[in-house]
Image (tube, grey):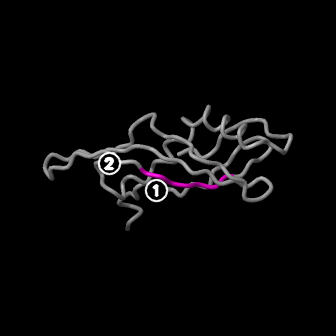
Amino acid sequence: MNNEIAGDFTSGCYPISLLKSVIDNNIREIEGSLVSGLMYYSENARYTAGSLEILDISQLEDSHYSMSYCYQWHIFNPCLDINTEESLTNAVTFIVHPEKIVFDIINNDRPSTADEL
C-alpha cells in the first residue's frame, strides 16, 4: 500500500490550507492505506468508496503534521443478520519532505498463513 504523495515542496514552508488541498487532490494515492484497518471489525467490512474526508490538519513541529480524517464503511452478513453502515474517525501523522509527503501509516494488511508460522 502506498503512503506517499509526490510533489515539489522545496520552498519549505506551506500553509495548512495548501497542504490540505494537495492531499485532497491526491487522496486516491493513499486512500487504501488510510482505510486498511477495517478487517479488525470483520472480514466482511468494506470501505464506502469516495467517503474519505479530511477533518483537520495541525502542525506538530517544523515539517511534521497530524491529520484527522473520517470515512464511511459498511458490513453485510446475511447469515448473522448484520447490515449496517458506520462512520470511523482516525488520525495519522505525516512529514513534508522536499519531493514528497510521507504518511506514517500502520500496515494493517492481514498476515498470510506463512507469516503466522
Q: Main secondary structure of the magenta part?
A: strand
Kind of element beneath mark 2: strand
Residue 82 sits inside the magenta stretch: no
**Residue 106 % position (x, y):** 53, 58
User: In the rendered structure, which amino acid carries the disc numbered 1?
Assistant: Asn
**Residue 52 % position (x, y):** 49, 40
Give the numbered dot on residue 5: none
Q: Is residue 78 above or below residue 37?
A: above
Residue hosting label 1: 108
Q: Nearer the viewer, residue 115 or 74?
A: 74
For label 2, count other residues whose C-alpha is less than 10 Å away and answer few (under 14), some (14-19) or many (20+). some
Residue 92 sits inside the magenta stretch: yes
CA separation in Å, label 1 and label 2: 14 Å
Magenta stretch, residue numbers: 88-94
Q: Is residue 26 above or below residue 74?
A: above
Q: Quadrant of residue 47?
A: top left
Indicate which label's residue lies in the foreground, 1 or 2.
2
For label 1, count other residues whose C-alpha is less than 10 Å away and answer few (under 14), some (14-19) or many (20+). some
Q: Quadrant of residue 54?
A: top right
How many numbered discs sit on the rendered protein? 2
**Mark 1 in CB contact with mark 2 (< 8 angstroms):** no
Q: Quadrant of residue 24?
A: top right
User: Could you tell me which residue is drawn at 64 percent across and 44 percent down?
Assistant: 4
**Which sits earlier in the primary sequence, circle 1 or circle 2?**
2
Residue hosting label 2: 45
**Residue 40 % position (x, y):** 36, 58
Q: Nearer the viewer, residue 41 or 55?
A: 55
